[in-house]
Image (cartoon, helix red, strand yellow):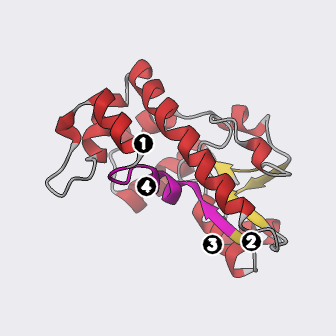
Amino acid sequence: LTGGIASGKSTAARYLLEQGATVIDADVLGHCAYDRGTAVYNEVIKTFGEDLITQNGSIDRGLLGKKVFGNNLELKKLTNIVWPEIRRLAQTKIDACVDKEIIVLEAAVLIEAGWQDLGHETWVIFVERDIAIERCIARDGLTREAILNRLEAQLSNDDRLKHADVVLSNNDSEEELFEQLD
């Protein structure tokens, strides 16, 4: 399950969980990948600097973001470190769910990372750009400029939809999204 910023991935995943699916959240796995003492933690510090280490020893992801976003070369270095570990963690979770009928991997970067082969179908939720901007302003309190920067840094709806086995529109109400999920 994938989609752009404010597309409704988390809403859809929560609904599918309530319906009995097992949901694996790649964002949660991403946070685990950065845990102190992991290979990812060590490689990120080695690559991007010891100034990323906070007082409690964790990685300051905000500072890391400032170092990589807007710089494609640096961002690629980071994704080359982190994405393989997130994939490994996802595969481990999937393998542990052998008795589950439906497993949903919720991943914003599913297509960019090439993880479609982890499942049987790729479901893409899309939302019109203006609606995504409105939702981000309301939900995250971000400036329009910050949201536009994030939108420009991700795949377009058209590019994402080229990889979809199932397309879900989330331009209207949650109820309409839930009907599509059903």
| Residue denoted by label 3 | 14
Question: Which of the two marks, 1 or 3, is nearer to us in this view?
Answer: 1
* Part of the protein shown in magenta: 23-37
Instruction: Give the residue at x 32% y 45%.
Output: 143
Q: Locate the N terminus by quadrant.
A: bottom right
Work out whether residue 32 can be spotted: yes
Label whose residue precedes the other's in the sequence (1 or 2) = 1
Q: Amino acid at mark 4?
A: His
Q: Locate the C terminus by quadrant.
A: bottom right
Question: Which of the two marks, 1 or 4, is nearer to us in this view?
Answer: 1
Give the x, y percent position of residue 138. 40, 60
Question: Residue 130 is drawn in which quadrant?
Answer: top right
Q: Amino acid at mark 3?
A: Arg
Q: Amino acid at mark 2?
A: Phe
Q: Which mark is residue 31?
A: 4
Question: Residue 83 is drawn in which quadrant?
Answer: top right
